[in-house]
Image (cartoon, grey):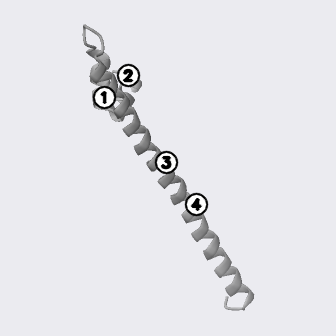
Amino acid sequence: MTVSDLAEYAYCPRAYWYRGHPPPEGPTRASVDSRASGERFHARTLTTRYRRERWSTAWWVLVAIGLLLCLLALARAGAF
């Protein structure tokens, strides 16, 4: 088993299984439609996850900047 096999299985266990067990008669119209639906699902899910992770990082950067500004304001006021 290779790292790419593990990555494919983690991405989609069905895709991993079908890669090793293709249908002998080739893909049917229903399976082509199902694959396209699965690809759209995975793209939508990953896009949502990437967007959430990106905004999460931005949120923590803003919190850190806010805390730094508060500390600077307190230092200027002579609280330290």
Q: Which label belongs to residue 58? A: 4
Identify which amino acid the numbered label 2 is placed on.
Thr
Q: Going 60% across and 68% down the picture, which residue do you hit? A: 62
First in sequence, mark 4 or 1: give its number. Answer: 1
Residue 73 locus on image (x, y percent): 70, 84
Q: Which quarter of the rendering shows the C terminus?
A: bottom right
Label located before the other in sequence (4 or 2): 2
Q: CA distance from mark 2 to mark 3?
A: 26 Å
Q: Nearer the viewer, mark 2 or mark 1?
A: 1
Inter-mark Cα distance, 4 to 2: 35 Å
* Residue at (67% x, 87% y) in the render: 74
Name which residue lies at 58% across and 60% down. Answer: 58
Labelled pair 3, 1 in contact (Cβ < 8 Å): no
Mark found first going from the N terminus, 2 or 1: 2
The three-letter amino acid code for the residue at tag 3 is Tyr
Question: Closer to the camera, 30 or 77?
Answer: 30
Q: Residue at 48% x, 54% y: name it.
A: 52
Identify the residue position indicated by label 1 in the image.
34
Task: Name which residue type carries label 1.
Answer: Ser
SS at mark 1 in the image: helix
Q: Nearer the viewer, mark 3 or mark 1?
A: 1
Whether 1 is drawn above or below 74: the answer is above
Real-space CA distance between mark 4 and mark 1, rounded to the nearest whole angstrom: 36 Å
- What label does residue 2 carry, if any? 2
- Identify the disc placed on residue 50: 3
Identify the element where label 4 is drawn.
helix
Labels 2 and 3: the sequence-earlier one: 2
